[in-house]
Amino acid sequence: MCLGIPGQITTITDPVNQLATVDIGGVRRAVNIACIVDDQHPIDTCVGEWVLVHVGFALNRLDPDEAAATLALLDAIAAPE
Amino acid sequence: MQYVHEFRDPTKAQGLIQAITALGEQITAHRPGPIKIMEVCGGHTHAIFKYGLEALLPGTVELVHGPGCPVCIMPKGRLDDAIAIAQQPGVIFTTFGDAMRVPGSHLNLLQAKAQGADIRMVYSPLDALAIAKANPDQSVVFFAIGFETTAPSTALTVLQAQAEGVTNFSLFSNHVLVVPALQALLDNPDLALDGFVGPGHVSLVIGTHPYDPIAQQYHKPVVVSGFEPLDILQSVWMVLKQLAEGRCQVENQYTRLVQPDGNAVALKAMAQVFQVRPTFDWRGLGSIPASGLAISPAFAAFDAEQQFTIPGKTIADHRACACGDILKGVKKPWDCKVFGTACTPQTPIGACMVSTEGACAAYYNYGRRSRQSTPSAVKPPVQTSGPSPQTRPTTGELSPAEPGKIEQYC
């Protein structure tokens, strides 16, 4: 139910209703991006960003630096002593 | 797919399992085992079985499957209410596919549809709003279910309907809140838990601070986790690390998406449209104070409970069904008399068998149909050295186990 899938915003299709096309593993779908647009992140800067899509809404943007940090930590935990 | 494949690396999974095994032995050297960790979210339960993680964990660590499946905790009475609305003349009732086969006291939504009710499955509440705009002469109701992950989407849809002047759209709100349910579980003396793997997608909305009372008052570690297999294994390791070091803190494994304060836009939309109900009934858990969301009076025009007369009855669960104890983590699915016999994914008696995120459906679909089921009954997903006849072609990532049945849409 709380299923969320990462996707990349390719185009802004409706700035008034804050709708964008998001590429999710090759499938493109209209997604509402209201939750990731604010003063620091105006709508026209969102193209190319990776977001988590849930029931047609982008709930948050994915942070590539944090993803890399998690993978580095995983390496450290999983490394043989 | 970026942000997915790299979190399914089988080599790292094996390293994590070794690290988990070492910590498990260290902890259980000083106390009785196993260490019981509840994964709260049904999405985690599904991933744990899909990737065979439970079979990989050492005997010192036991995963308890929590109540974080909104379909599973939906009481029969609310299903009856939904069906009563759907059967009204002039109503188009829209719902996520997950809810279609949840049993009410007499019917489920699929059967009500077969009897003539106009019930349509949608992917998004925005699809329901589009149906309303395309059918101005009919009343379109959206069956709003889900935790804080989903509530912002329905709230934003109501705000859009209001902005566009759509007057034939309403919500039947059954949204529920995670933290009150966890507190109710922790107040149950039957349940002995050592820590929690917290729900990642709920937390990207609400942040990590709402879990502070669980660490501070109940003294249980909470690790907010992502949904890929390495995320879950790392989170189990982080809970164990806290236990080994005598800490009880809220930690965040899912930092690529979850911030401590959550998502401000989503929280604001929820606060605008919803208000917390005094109590809400959960299947198996009973009435839990301040655990559900109703539409606030300012948006009464979008509240199906105000627009329609509903039975509003409390209906007892089937006597043979152990969903309640399974949702509390007190029983395993195979402890239920009807599990896998009268109750299967095709003919579910309890809601834990309906949703793929329910513990019963997960146990049934992935071969854990009796206590005697050994890990070998589950196809091991981690690629070891050299292919075997049972080994699927290696793709360089942790591969899902084959479910015994076709997965539902969720």
Image (tube, coloured by chain):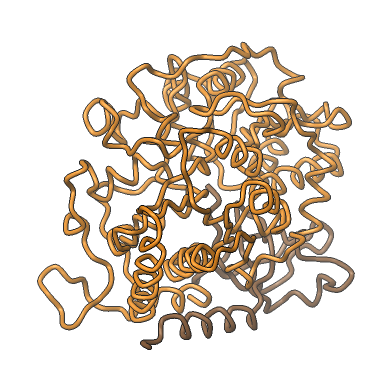
Chain colours: A brown, B orange
Q: Is residue B355 above or below residue B316?
A: below
Q: Residue at x 51, y 62 (%)?
A: B243
Q: Position of residue B28 (x, y in %)?
A: 37, 60
Q: Residue at x 77, y 62 (%)?
A: A14
Q: Is residue B178 found left or right of B344 in the rendered image?
A: right
Q: Position of residue B339 (x, y in %)?
A: 27, 32
Q: Nearer the viewer, residue B257 or B269?
A: B257
Q: Nearer the viewer, residue B328 or B104?
A: B328
Quarter where residue B226 is shown = bottom right
Q: Position of residue B56 (x, y in %)?
A: 29, 64
Q: Is residue A78 above or below residue A28?
A: below
Q: Position of residue B287 (x, y in %)?
A: 61, 24
Q: Residue at x 60, y 55 (%)?
A: A54
Q: Nearer the viewer, residue B273 or B19?
A: B19
Residue at the front extreme of this rendering:
B30
Q: Is residue B128 found left or right of B401 in the rendered image?
A: right
Q: Is residue B128 found left or right of B369 in the rendered image?
A: right
Tally of marks? 0
Q: Is residue B209 found left or right of B85 in the rendered image?
A: right
Q: Is residue B9 above or below residue B241?
A: below
